[in-house]
Image (cartoon, rainbow, N blue to C red):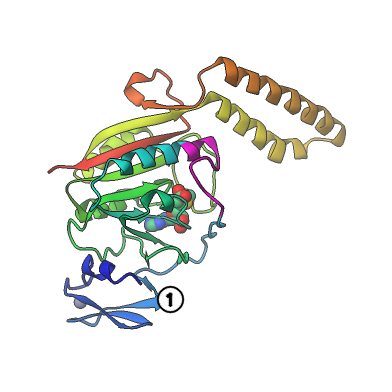
Amino acid sequence: MKKEILDLMNCPQCGAVLLEKSSESLACSKCDYTARMVQGIPLFTDVPATIEPWEKVERGPNKGTAWRKSNWKFLNGFVKALPSNAKILDVGAGHGDFADIFEGRQYYSLDIVPYPEVDLVADLGEVNPFKDSAFDVVVLMNVLEHVYECRSLLKSIARIVAPGGSVVITVPFLLKVHQAPFDFARYTPYFIEKMAADAGLQVESLQGYYDTQYLLNESLGNAWQYSIKTQPKSQQFVARSLVFIIQRLFNWFGKVTRKGFIDATQSQPNPAPVGYLVVLRKKA
Ligand SMILES: C[S@@+](CC[C@H](N)C(=O)[O-])C[C@H]1O[C@@H](n2cnc3c(N)ncnc32)[C@H](O)[C@@H]1O
Ligand SMILES: [Zn+2]
């Protein structure tokens, strides 16, 4: 466990100092609160029994889907502009697919699953062990859609962001159900704005990632993987041949239309992005 992280925390029950009692637990210096440690990772909340852990995949600026590449570009741009002493918390970091972006920074990560890469396990909507204003930036990459009580989570996060600090969010809009059954919602910009205001945060930027070719190809991929299988064998052959031809057409279509791009939602008449890329700010 990173020692400095204890300085950012206090007892979630009484607010007193938390101490590393042994390699097996953290304990409050005042009350009876303890947090169990599993392989050096403190657990502030129970790990949900039904969650399907994510497979570790190799990630980087040019890896994964077009949506993930857009996430990388957005997050990297944001982090580059931060002062070198900014304290950053990555909530729902999973295996740390974006961790390279934070190299050399005061970066901490958590998840509700004890992935070996995270510093602690917590659902901050339930138990938040961090001090008020502990972080300059809290990051939520592709997490809010998996959180049933997303409004309580954002309120709890707003408390631990320093005045003038920010919450950086990416959240899919047109993306298939994933990590079932832990996939609860898709949000419109209006929901995001209202949820932010309720948590005492202001929308600094709200952009969409627009990519018609990607969406068409995703639909075709879903048809290939799921729908075609249910057809009689003779039709499957025709369907797969058609998919092959249509895919070629889509690739050509991608060459004659605007490729995937990030843009402010206000400047876009297109209301169908793959997802939203958001920066919320806490008043200084
Ligand atoms: C789709 S994955 C995204 C992982 C990573 N942020 C990324 O974009 O590569 C969603 C992650 O959020 C975690 N998660 C779900 N609910 C959470 C919560 N309430 N607090 C923290 N993490 C949560 C899941 O365990 C999972 O690792
Ligand atoms: Zn205590």
Where is residue 29? Give x, y as percent: 19, 81
Q: Is residue 200 visible?
A: yes
Q: Quadrant of the C terminus?
A: top left
Q: Is residue 257 left or right of residue 198?
A: right
- Asked whether residue 201 is drawn in magenta, I would say no
Q: How many marks?
A: 1
Q: Amino acid at mark 1?
A: Val
Q: Residue furthest right?
A: 234
Tell me the residue at 26%/66% (across/down).
129
Q: Which residues are magenta?
A: 57-69
Where is residue 178? Give x, y as percent: 54, 47
Q: Is residue 249 above or below residue 140?
A: above
Label 1 sits on residue:
38
Tell me the residue at 40%/51% (across/down).
147
Q: Is residue 146 visible?
A: no
Q: Is residue 51 above or below residue 97?
A: below
Q: Is residue 74 left or right of residue 195?
A: right
206 and 152: which is toward the camera: 206
Q: Is residue 120 left or right of residue 160?
A: right
What secondary structure prevails in the magenta region? Answer: loop
- Asked whether residue 60 is drawn in magenta, I would say yes
